[in-house]
Amino acid sequence: MKLFTPHYFEDNFFNINFDKLKKDGIKLIITDIDNTLVPYAVATPTQKINRLFEKLQMMGFDICFLSNNQSQRVDVFNEGLGYYSVSLSRKPLPYGYKQCMQYHNCTKEETVFIGDQLFTDILGAKLAGIKCILVKPIKTNDEEFFIRLKRSFEKFILKKITPKKLGVIGTPVSHSMSPILHGFFYRKFKINAVYKKYCPTYENLGEYISYFKENGFLGFNVTVPYKQVIIKYLDYIHPDAEKIGAVNTVKIVDGKLYGYNTDGDGFCMQIKDIKGKDVKIIGAGGSVLSVVHCLIKNGAKSVTIYNRTLEKAKVIADLYDNVCAKPLDVFSADNCQILINAVLLNVVAVKDLDGIEEGTEVFDINYNKKETEFIKMALKYNVTVKNGLMMLVNQGLLAHKIWFGKEEN
């Protein structure tokens, strides 16, 4: 099976991360033509293909065409481009791949092949010892009978080797650690899946969701600013997420979207005992509502939210009987067993933690830095302080369970 398994899977040629290939030391791109770049019946490159090739050349890549088709087909497609090409290449034999590498004086490590068929394109690249990327064929109903027959056999292998697709949407999303986290899960638990970042706008959010549904995504995470907006696209929302009014995890089943919120549960999983405890929270934004909901669900005696804008805290407090809102300037750290900082990274909203009791559990839900300014201040009071990293890990594990139905340790 390994001989038919590409190094990377992509939906199409344009989705390939060429920047990453460049960083990985790739210099030569060898590509199939039919149904990889254009449909079988299209004779010449599209403008979109031409623009991409220009970009790739500016990035320093060499490009070769490698096709089992007749030279006339390849020559017509290559006219005006002038790339080195090999027609009647006899894929999956490695001869044509090696010709391209020899022409451009590139090693196996510097070469990648892109194609749409397992039994010829990918097998040939594997036999030649080079990295390969499998893209979905653009159109198959006008292909020759023998090729369509091969594709019918390929379906059985593809079902086994194609990774599950997942991701996270947000704006901005470049800082998200979720791909690193879920990538670790997949390696650790030996799951064949890929997880990527997506950055839609409000205007094209619906197009992204349609793309996920149409391309077999198992699900996706949602971060700011779409945790509330996503709800209108859902077919079902979990009662906890509905109460919170925000969704951070979506599962796709038979084209229907199921929404959940794992933020609060992810935070509370790191607290040994919540029942009967008094909790104070500094800040009322971000994931605070989901954290409050989980604290109350797990039996917290009381929750007090301190916020500069009192009305924002009251919106949350009014949803629960034993939650109250107070202005930030009356905050004190006494009379609580759990203290949570939920203001933005490196914004210190309180002057001190005077009066904090020994044994108070202190948390900062920010995870981007090991020690935020709030954590540095809290450590002066001889209390145990945790950042938001475990919240991130735990909410990710809960999302993992929703998608894969497995509760990992």
Image (spheres, rainbow, N blue to C red):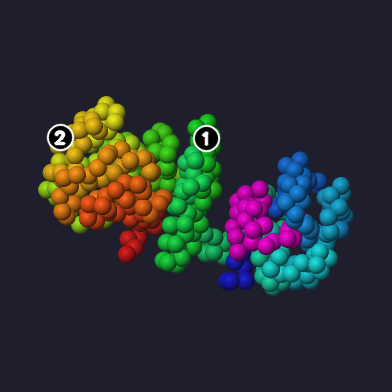
Amino acid type of the residue that numbered disc 2 sits on in the rendered structure: Asp
Residue at screen point 70% across, 53% down: 36
Q: Which residue is mark 2?
A: 321
Question: Looking at the image, which is closer to me, 331 or 96?
Answer: 331
Residue at screen point 42% across, 39% down: 224
Answer with left or right where residue 354 lies relative to residue 259: left
Q: Residue 226 falls in which quadrant of the image? A: top left
Question: Looking at the image, which is closer to me, 275 or 146?
Answer: 275
Count of numbered circles on the image: 2
Residue interval drawn in magenta:
7-33
Is residue 114 depicted above or below 261 in this figure?
below
User: Is 300 a magenta residue?
Assistant: no
Q: Which residue is mark 1?
A: 201
Question: Looking at the image, which is closer to me, 137 or 350?
Answer: 350
Where is residue 64 drawn, in percent x and y? 79, 58
Where is residue 254 drawn, in percent x and y? 44, 47
Label 1: how many residues lie within 10 Å, few (<14), some (14-19) or many (20+)? some
Residue at screen point 30% across, 38% down: 349
Answer with left or right where residue 296 lies relative to residue 51: left
> What is the quadrant of the C terminus in the image?
bottom left
Residue at screen point 53% across, 31% down: 203
Q: Residue 382 falls in which quadrant of the image? A: bottom left
Disc assigned to residue 163: none
Is residue 324 depicted above or below 360 in this figure?
above
Where is residue 21 drawn, in percent x and y? 65, 58
Answer with left or right where residue 48 lies relative to residue 264: right
